[in-house]
Image: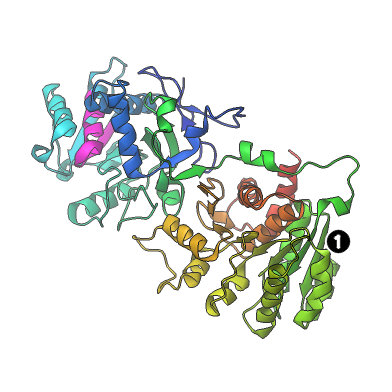
Amino acid sequence: MNYKQSSYSASNSISTDKSPRAECHLHRHQKKSNDRFNYIHYCYSVESVRNLDYLMVQEGLVENSYQLMNRAADRLLDFINRNYPRIEHITIFCGAGNNAGDGYVLARLAREQEKEPRFAVQLIAIADPDTLSGDARHAYQEWLNCGGSIDSMDNVHLQATDLIVDALIGTGLNRSLENEWYETIAAINNAPTPVLSVDIPSGLDANTGSVHGIAVKANDTVTFIAQKLGMYTAQARHYCGKIHFSTLGMDESLYSKVEHSAVLMEWADTGDKLPCRSPASHKGDLGHLLIIGSDYGMGGACRIAGEAALRTGAGLVSIATRKENVSTITSTRPELMAHGIEHADELEPLLKKANAIAIGPGLGTEQWGIALLDKVTQYLKHLPDSAPKVYCVIDADALNIMARHNVVIQNPDIIYTPHFGEACRLLKYDSERPSEDTDRFAMLRTLKAKYHGTFILKGAGTLIHLQDNIAICPYGNEGMASAGMGDCLTGIMGALLAQKLTVSDAAQVGVCLHAKAGDLAAMEGKNGMIVSDLFPKIRQILND
């Protein structure tokens, strides 16, 4: 089976063949009638991956851990041969630990392979090889035994090599990199040469996706045994490049013996949750969403959310906003029903007509916005048990009001959609900037525990806290870092709730639909992308 390259924002590469020479193939849009392929979408902590390594030996899938190291190096060599068939020279950077061991074994296998013409191998050791122990030391000795040599940074010429292999640091890093480690990674990143990282880019935290001072910026990362928790979110999206995954022959049944920490979403499965229309349906069957927001000077926010909701299939969309915004909204999108609201009590008849509410886009944090949010929370709180449930999305300034005034709603029928800064305000953090210690997964769990509901932590590799899992969205791109994208997501999510998707399904479908639409728009260029570029893509995806 061939390696096939695939963007980290698309499906992952996988291996399901158990033979030693089996390699990764692209798993794309695989319809699953059972749990056979679910392990591919599980993401594990560093500790859990170590337990899986141990299970492979314990269950006899490999004779020992050194055989597992050889299998990983074999996969790496096969990847290089298939994806870089014309290279003449590679430079392998080895550090300490088993990641370095993978690099030493790769160097030996490349030197000994029968493929012609062979490529030359230069091995650069950053850590003193004499300090290596265990399997890594064994790998080093075998490299020397086959006639290999060790070079230092003084002898490296990265402009003259065809491929750089990063085998410096594995998944165990938990501190900032300094001195020769920092300088080596900086040199790799400044080189004009493609970079392949072994298991994870060096300097990247495998549990959180944050960077410890500096990290290798890889073109490709081949990761083994299991998907690493931090590789699809936060700064990892900038450093991992295209991620390729090989199980190294792990038996599927063993994955269930180790607890996973998150699930990597795939549109082929998530999209199946989209509502289906009957040929006899009318607009009343497709839900009525009420969007509340847009204080003075921010009329565009609700306009964006409103059109996103319509394009996502909501039958009716009403907007409660300042009177000054009504004519602008209805003149540019007459399908939206805009109502001028000056006092919170004027919301009452609109709330009673809606089966889903979205509040926050452009709401502002002054008294008008505060009163409207209070009206919505009181309305939801006092709904009779006999009344149909009304679901709600809380975003943007509604979150800022909650943070500023210590509002805690604790309603399971609410979806909250903070970005990193809004999440920090809700949690009363001192800083609203991510650092090398930032753990977005921990933030999400803390938000869930405090506020209940379903939390979506937006950003690169958006996270969703579901009832028993954290889900990671692998789609989306940097072109979506522009005004109004959050308002668009709010409208999408509100429309799905109005069409009676469960809170959990609406969160997953909404996040993936939004990101996939952004990826389609990016095919026309990421620079200069604006939120309205997503509207036709949303419709296209829904009708695909």
Spot occupied by residue 99 in the image (x, y as percentages of width and height): 25, 38
Instruction: Determine the residue located farthest toward the left in the rendered image.
Output: 130
Image: magenta residue range: 90-108
Q: Nearer the viewer, residue 171 or 372?
A: 372
Q: Residue at x 12, y 28 (%)?
A: 141
Membership of 425 in magenta stretch: no
Instruction: Determine the residue located farthest toward the bottom in the rendered image.
Output: 367
Residue under pointer 1: 335
Q: Is residue 82 left or right of residue 136?
A: right
Say few, some or many: other residues with alpha carbon within 10 Å of mark 1 (under 14 / 14 to 19 / 20 or more).
Answer: some
Would residue 148 be visible to someone looking at this image? no
Q: Is residue 384 left or right of residue 82?
A: right
Give the image quarter of residue 170. top left
Q: Is residue 301 above or below residue 496?
A: below
Would residue 338 be visible to someone looking at this image? yes
Q: Residue at x 62, y 27 (%)?
A: 33
Disc 1 residue type (three-letter):
Glu
Q: Nearer the viewer, residue 212 or 218?
A: 212
Give the image quarter of residue 305. bottom right
Majority secondary structure in the magenta region: helix
Q: Residue at x 78, y 58 (%)?
A: 388
Instruction: Determine the residue located farthest toward the top in the rendered image.
Output: 114
Q: Is residue 103 above or below residue 215?
A: above
Spot occupied by residue 51 in the image (x, y as percentages of width and height): 31, 36
Q: Is residue 513 left or right of residue 390?
A: left
Q: Residue at x 65, y 53 (%)?
A: 503
Spot occupied by residue 206 in the image (x, y as percentages of width and height): 35, 47
Secondary structure under tag 1 reads loop
Q: Is residue 109 above or below residue 349?
A: above
Q: Is residue 459 above or below residue 296?
A: above
Membership of 93 in magenta stretch: yes
Spot occupied by residue 140 in the image (x, y as percentages of width and height): 15, 31
